[in-house]
Amino acid sequence: MATPSIAVARPAPSRFPRPGGARAFVERLRSGDEIAHLITLIFASTILFLTAWLVYELWVHSALPRQTFGLGFLTASTWDPVFEHFGALPFIYGTVVTSALGLLIAVPIGVGAAIFLAELAPHGISEALTFSIELLAAVPSVIIGLLGIFVLVPILRKVVEPFLKATLGFLPFFQGPAFGIGFLAAGLILAIMVVPFIISISRGILLAVPTEQREAALALGATKWESTWKVVVPYARTGIMGSVFLALARALGETMAVTMVIGNDPKISASLFAPGYTIAAAIANEFTEATGDLHLQALIELGLVLFFLTILINAFGRILILVTTRKGTSRE
C-alpha cells in the first residue's frame, strides 16, 4: 500500500528585518539602546583610562630613582635627602606594621559587631547603630587625628604603654621608652578608622545569606547562635574576608591621622612604642620641601609602590565580595 505524501508548505519570506540586520540596528539606535550602551561604555572606559594614566605618570616621573637605585630602593633603609641616599624600606615597614596592627584590633571588633547587627540585634537597634556607624565612617581623618593627639596619645603615654611595659616588657614589641606616639598609636587610630568599613560591609554580606540557610539550621534543632556561627558566618566567610581586604587598603592609604600620631621617624624598630613612618605620611610631609629632582622622584616612586598595593588589595577584596553576593543571590 502506497504511503500518501504530505506536502509541506514553506513559510513565506518575512517582511520584517532579521535580528542583527541593518534595519534592526537602526531601530535599536532610534530606541536609545545603542546610544545608552555607547555612553555607559565611555564612562566605564574612562575609569580604566584614568587608572592607566595615573600609573603611566607615576612610572615616567620616577625614572631617575629607578635608574639610580634599581630594586635596592625597596630594600635600603637610609633616607637622607641631603646626600641623596633614598631607601623605601622604613616606610614600607611602617605602612605594613601599622596596617597589620590596625586590622588585628579592628577585625574582631568589626566582625563581632556585624554579626550582632545582622543576626542578633532587634531591628530598631540594628538600624540605629548602623546609622551611627555610617556617620563614624564619614568623620574626616584629620578630626580623628586631632582626637588621637589630645586624647589617645596621653592615655597611651601615661597608662597603656607603662602597663604593657611592666607586664609584657620581656617581649621586644613592648620595650623602650613610652612616648605615646609611635606604631601603637598609629595602629589604634587606623583601627578606629577602618572598623566602620568592616562593620558596614560585613553586615551587608551577612544579610545577603539566604533565609533558607538559617531556617534549615533551626529546623534541625540548632539554637540561634549555633545557626549564626556554624551556618551563616561560614556561608559569608568569603565576603567578610573581602571587607577585611578593603579595610586593609583603606589603612594602607591613610595619611593625615597617621602622620599626626606616628612620630615621623624613618627607622625600623621592633618596639611598638617607637616612632616610625609610613609611605603616605612621607609623601605628605616631604613633597612640598623636595627641591632636588632625585628627592622628588623618589617620593613619586613611593607613591607608585603604594598605588600598586592599594589597587591590588582593593581588586582582590571586590572580587571576594562579588563572588559571595552572587552565590547568595543564585541560591536564594
Image (cartoon, grey):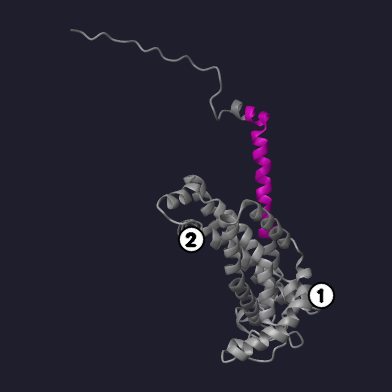
Residue at screen point 70% across, 58% down:
134
Residue 248 vs residue 146: left or right?
Answer: left
Q: What element does badge 1 sit on? A: loop
Name the mark on residue 197. none
The residue that mark 1 highlights is: 288
Residue 208 vs residue 249: left or right?
Answer: left
- Is 101 above or below relative to 319? below
- Is 89 above or below relative to 329? below
Residue 23 position within the rendered picture, expressed as x and y whole percent measured from the top left: 61, 25
Q: Nearer the viewer, residue 165 or 84?
A: 165
Density class for disc 2 (Cα within 10 Å; few <14, some 14-19, many ≥20) is some
Residue 97 vs residue 328: left or right?
Answer: right
Name the mark on residue 229. 2
Query: Hey, what amino acid is under mark 1?
Result: Thr
Helix, strand or loop for the magenta stretch, by majority: helix
Q: Earlier in the sequence, mark 1 or mark 2?
A: 2
Residue 114 position within the rendered picture, expressed as x and y whole percent measured from the top left: 59, 60
The image quarter containing residue 63 is bottom right
